[in-house]
Amino acid sequence: MNDRVYIFDTTLRDGEQSPGASMNFVEKIRMARQLERLQVDVIEAGFPIASEGDFESVKEIAKQIRTVSIAGLCRANDNDIDKAWEALKYAEKPRIHTFIATSDIHLKYKLKKTRDEVLENAVKAVRRAKSYCNDVEFSCEDASRSDIGFLCQIVEAAIAEGATVINIPDTVGYAVPHEYGAIIRLLMERVPNIGKAILSVHCHDDLGLAVANSLSGVINGARQIECTINGIGERAGNASLEEIAMAIRTRAEALKVSTNINTEEIYKSSKMLVSLTGMHIQRNKAIVGENAFAHEAGIHQDGMLKNPLTYEIMTPASVGIKHSTLVLGKHSGRHALKQRYEELGYKLTTEELEKAYVLFSKLADEKKQVFDDDLVAILQDEISSLEETYKIETLQVTSGINIVPTATVGLKKGDQFLQDSSTGDGPVDAAYRAIGRITNIKTDLLDYSIKSVSWGQDAIGEVFVKIAIDGYVFNGRSASTDVITGSVKAYVNAINHAISARFRKEQSTNENVGV
């Protein structure tokens, strides 16, 4: 029987620290629910003392997610640990995750502490965390560049104080697999009380070795892997959860371990994260990339027709991908649409189906075929829980060679119809300026991108925008066959996110002062 490896997902903490990957309160809750469906063992929900937003997110996730352990990160000091517990105390399965650097380079230049001082800080931190909850994880930051003797000493001391999980991070992605595996093996051999804790691995991908290093750690005795959806994270990212899970499942006979991951939820988790953050993955990304199960070469196609095992080591269905293409058009009814969504893994309510069908019908009038990715794009737009302050009613643009681009936009705010016009460098810029005049909201456009979600001249374009308002960043997204319409919808979506965030902040402030 294979040993169990626990999956510690840090998408909402380390992953969200990736530049451009920030999520708002509602989006974090939505992602956490999907991670629960994925059946990860631990969700690291955030760094509670880092910001009030992080604290509130960890607190709410702790309240809502009941079947998974919820972890909060904290440095090895009293204030951090107390703040983490304040957020985590609502969890069914709380875990305090405290850390301190152990490499000499961090001690000398960052902490300016001696090894003895760091050891004392670690012991006190684990002891304080243990006074709040039984499940305590201790991490040796930059462990892969730490002296192995000191590493053994601090790990033994942390376990003696009650740490249940010991994490050995390759914080800067410096290790290579045989080195990293040797560190885990030496800890298993030299630390006398190592059997009282689970060894964990947390590897970064600076040299593209995060997954390989993680598996090397497991081969040498680690039984928890820390990873993220799509491998997002600081700098080059973290070990990719989907690659870890499928490597263990596909090569179970070689690795002799297993996980509890519901692999059929992998693709949906990946797509959701892309939708929430706007961080696209490359087409040839292992497991979840668009080309992961695509075959173009004639020899490959011939082999696939005879037996898929000739060129596929796992089935698309095993990760939640359905490659059969159902051709849907304007003559298709609600029953066919519902059936296809169920085949794609989405069970819609009557109300959700009706909304999706209206959008589908409009799209079917514009396109010859509606593909699976089009359906997912429709659904991502439709299931958003964002309350829209502004809704687009009318849009007219004029643009061309030797013509000044002009846009007239009409927005609905409650019962009010607001309309204005503006010129710009192009039709999209003109429309954005008109929206600014209507809403009286000053924004800085940080990022703007368009990506086709299917194929053909009439493919849906998925538009992502990132705006800054008063120093705060908000994302907007929309999908349309008309890229200008999609661009305007995405921009209004971002503004609505900003207004929603402002309302929640004001509501929270009022509650805090007893209003």
Image: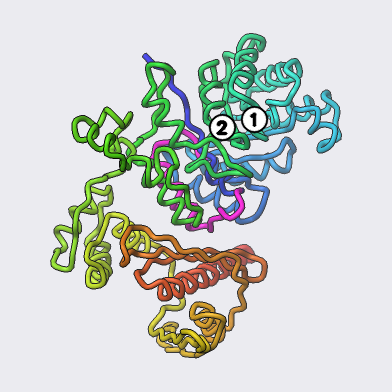
First of labels 1, 2 by sequence position: 1
Viewer can see residue 127: no
Q: Position of residue 437 (x, y in %)?
A: 56, 86
Compute the Cα span from label 1 to label 2: 8 Å
State the residue position of label 1. Answer: 170
Badge 2 marks a residue whose secondary structure is helix
Task: Name the disc covering residue 184, or none.
Answer: none
The reply, left or right, for residue 83 in relation to residue 253 is right
Pick the front one: 14 or 299: 299
What's the amino acid at mark 2?
Ala
Q: Is residue 482 magenta?
A: no
Q: If the image is split into quadrants, where does the N terminus sit?
A: top left
Q: Position of residue 391 (x, y in %)?
A: 41, 78
Where is residue 124? Give x, y as percent. Answer: 74, 29
Q: Secondary structure at mark 1?
A: strand
> Do the residues bearing badges 1 and 2 touch, measured as CB atoms within 8 Å?
yes
Q: Is residue 493 above or below residue 205?
A: below
Which residue sits at x=24%, y=53%? 341
Residues drawn in magenta: 18-43
Corner quadrant of residue 364: bottom left
Mark 1 is on which residue type? Asp
From the image, tell me which residue sits under label 2.
210
- Left-right relation of 277 to 105: left
- Report crowding for label 1: few under 14, some 14 to 19, many 20 or more residues within 10 A (C-alpha): many
Foreground pick, 165 / 438: 438
- Residue 430's place in the image compared with 279, above or below, is below
List the single residue furthest toward the front.
Answer: 298
Mark 2 neighbour density, 10 Å: few (under 14) some (14–19) many (20 or more): many
Q: How many marks?
A: 2
For the C terminus, the image quarter is bottom right
